[in-house]
Image (cartoon, rainbow, N blue to C red):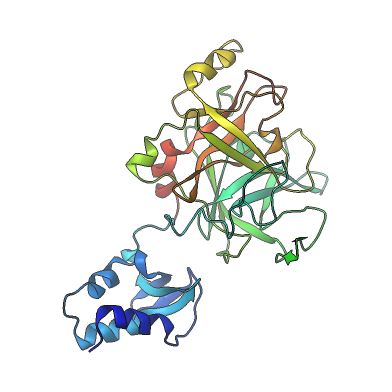
Amino acid sequence: MFGRAAFLVWWTVSSVAALELGQKCLTPVGEPGECIPFRECQPLIDIYNKPVPTPDDTRFLTESRCGMLERKTLVCCTVSSKKSSLPESPHCGLQVADRVIGGQPTEIDEFPWTALIEFEKPDGSFGFHCGGSLINERYIVTAAHCIKSIPRGWKVHRVRLGEWDLTTANDCQNDFCSHAPIDLDVEQIVVHNNYDPKDQSNANDIALIRFTRQVRYSQTVRPICLPWSASLRSRDHVGQPSWAAGWGKTETATASEKKLKVAMNVTSLQDCAPAYRRGGILLKATHMCAGGVRGKDTCSGDSGGPLMRQITGAWYLIGVVSFGPQKCGTAGIPGVYTNVADFVDWIQDNIY
């Protein structure tokens, strides 16, 4: 009988009928399942960790294999056994190559979770006017105001992933060419039920968009991590560097042709709130502020797009672009974001 280490090596390199991450499958006993990373399937981990596995155990593990993803084994795991339908580090928040970031334009494969929301307008035209962040194979997170506070007659048409340069069909940079962007039809939109378009503070400014099909991950299409753990939910980001990325589009701004990024420090609500209180806007604990430096603001990103931090090697979505001063990049007035840590349970409860 194989030892566990030897078995794992053999198991990883042996041939298997290849499915892709997230595809439906049947377990060796005929139960419906999903093809997911081995480390996310607790029942199979329990079998693997047995001190003395039986031949039937070994056979069950072998027959559970369904594919490979970046040299990692995928297994057919019963749907009810999945730890979560949202990925956790190290299966999210990764770029193929992290670079020293300087300057405004992004590299072609930077922030591969950034999404564009395309709207259909009453005159029959289409345009990208909001952003979002990919969180798994079927969903992006965006801002509720991108759904509920848009011009009359507009409606969400599609979501685009894997985009970099809006002027080209296929993007190339430094001898690397990406696949064409993916346009995904919308199956369902869930807006937080406590979001009120008439509320000037834009409290609960968060929404989910579900695609009609699963997306296949690639070098330019990957999910960002959400702050699941208690330590991440309670982490104080004040004074820490964060990044926003997008195409410089809000409902009123003009577009950048290429995806941009902007670095900003997170600021405390205590320091941020007075500037908005003067305008009659009361910020809440579910808000987050960042920026306040002249010329650096989320006018360089999309409404609904991500505010991100890299923590222990993975990128986490800490904020969703919500609103800011009338003149973007006004010194002393940070932009306001939805604090994602306060909404991770809502996100989990509203996906399927």
| Identity of the residue drawn at 38% across and 46% down | 228
Quick check: 205 above or below 333?
Answer: below
Please state the horizontal and vertical placement of residue 40, each as a whole percent of the image: 36, 64
In the displayed image of the protein, which residue is found farthest to the front? 100
**Residue 53 seen in the current view:** yes
Label count reads 0
Residue 28 in sight: no
Q: Residue 124, how many percent across, how many down?
A: 81, 49
Residue at point 70% right, 61% down? 181
Is residue 166 rendered to the left or right of residue 342?
right
Q: Toward the viewer: 328 or 207?
A: 328
Reply above or below: 335 against 316: above
Name the residue rendered at 54%, 19% in the picture.
272
Residue 176: horizontal and vertical position, in percent? 72, 65
Q: Quadrant of the C terminus?
A: bottom left
Q: Quadrant of residue 331?
A: top right
- Where does the image place residue 319, in percent across and percent down from the top left? 52, 37
Q: Residue at x 47, y 85 (%)?
A: 17
Position of residue 64 relative to residue 111, above or below, is below
Specify the farthest residue to the left. 52
State whether residue 176 is above or below residue 320.
below
- Quarter of the image for the N terminus: give it: bottom left
